[in-house]
Amino acid sequence: MLAIAGTVPDESFPLIRGRMTLKGDDTLIINGTEVPVNRGTPALAGAVIRAGEVLGLDAPEGILVGDIGRGEGSRKLYRHLVETLCEAEFSTLVFHYLQPDVDWHNRILFALDAMNQRPRLIADAGFMYAAKMSGQAISYDLFTPDVGELSFLADETAPHPFYTRGFILHQDNQVPDLINRACNHGNSARHLLIKGRCDYVVCSDKITDQVDQPSAEAMEAVGGTGDTLTGIVSALMETNRPIPDSARIAARANRLAGSFASPTPASQVADIIHHIPMALSRAMEEQEKTSNE
Amino acid sequence: MFGLNFNFLKRKNRTAKEQPPQEDLGILVFENTSEVIQAENILKSRGWTVKVMGPPPGIQSGCDLVIQFPLIENLTLMRLLTEAGIPPLEMVPVTAPLLKPVDLFHTKDFGDHLMIRAANMKLTIDKKTKIIVNISGGGCPDVPYLAWQMVGKHMDEAPRPGKIGHTLCGYALELAYEEMSRQCSL
């Protein structure tokens, strides 16, 4: 089972764990509670659900809690995971918008070690920041940074992207150098899917693929498009596909979904989620065709 | 502590490229980033030379930003901030290197829309109406909250990220907001 741990931007939202479904493209339902899908973890969950429809996956399990940046909800969720992971039967576990907290991060890793079978681990957003700073990035199967976050991974001293040193940040157009630097300092997961003008797929410090088409410049401004990419790749990994294949197909599918939505800088991510099934189907067909050639 | 748990800030070795400690400087430690922003605004508006920086090793309280100031002014600043209702949690001399926040802005003009990126946060507005149409980037849990509160509102009517944000991502968005306001006023 694929599980997603993350937050929703509502302080009164309690810790809820349950299967998630979509109502339309803009409302997530978990245990009967509705959550708007506009960005953040609900957008990631929406993308997983829509991709799962194409891939024949069961509804993903959500472990969601309200947090508006104070960290209280995140800590509640961390505590819940530490207490319950040993009994969970997750095959893929995605960590998302959570307050970066290295101490809790490390407790989670201990709890994962105690599981009968450790799930595939994907970290994005705040939890990826904590994973990097813990010095245990290599414990993860996949990180999904954007280029700015890759600079942060490449800066061995930065505890948050906000403190990435300028001389590293200036390497905006030299993604391969940043990848090398992140890997050399042990701050990369085993695989990276780097979101940007060109998406890069990295396996054990080697770039295995680059995806830059179709290109819709406005996507950079649309909040949540990175979340949808993380959602699609998570769903593909849940089908046991090799991670580099999953990452390549996801990058292509996310771009196609964006292109189908004809985005402007004012588009909302629900517009893009709507197109994921068609986009993913096409990306998989292309992949199959390439494999048969 | 409202901010991120940056105990790990204290664990990493620092390099020569970081700002060296200066014995004539002190730092003001606050409970959360909103207080840091308020204090920064008050002090700068009164002509004080202060800088927002990352906390040094050894500071176990407060949020993930501190205000660096000339140590000799400690009593004056403490009184001023206490009178303003935002007394710092601590005021200590700088004895270790401070992390310097990203200070680069990137502007992208989409024609009808303008996007400003500060650190890892991006703010996009409709150039004609000044309505905030999107907020993207970032990874802390106040980012979706800030987007929820700000998107769809006019720049002048939207709540300031510095007021309702709690993390470094929120502070970065405040910087983007300030830069956007500056560019809109040109």
Image: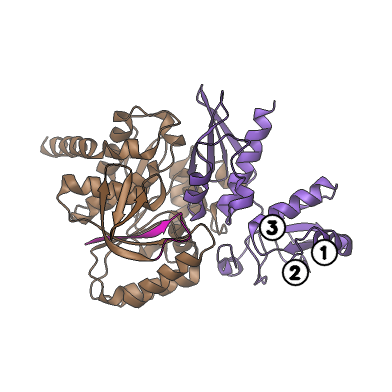
- Quarter the C terminus of chain B occupies: top right
Is residue A213 among what the camera can see? no
Relative placement, left or right, of B138 versus B161 is left
In terms of image quadrants, where is residue A78?
A: bottom left
User: Is A8 contained in the magenta span?
Assistant: yes
Mark 3 or 2: the one toward you: 3
In terms of image quadrants, where is residue A70?
A: bottom right
Kindly report the distance in space between the C-alpha atoms of the residues bearing marks 3 and 2. 13 Å
Check if mark 3's residue and mark 2's residue have beta carbons within 8 Å. no
Q: Which residue is mark 2?
A: B90
Q: For the residue marked with disc 3, what is the amino acid?
A: Glu
Image position, residue A186 (x, y; %)? 44, 61
Q: Which residue is mark 3?
A: B35
In terms of image quadrants, where is residue B87?
A: bottom right
Which portion, as a residue range, is magenta? A1-14
Q: Which residue is mark 1?
A: B23
- Quarter the N terminus of chain B occupies: bottom right
The colour mode here is by chain
Kindly report the distance in space between the C-alpha atoms of the residues bearing marks 2 and 1. 17 Å
Work out whether residue A158 or residue A236 is closer to the camera in this orientation and state it: A236
Work out whether residue B25 or residue B165 is closer to the camera in this orientation and state it: B165
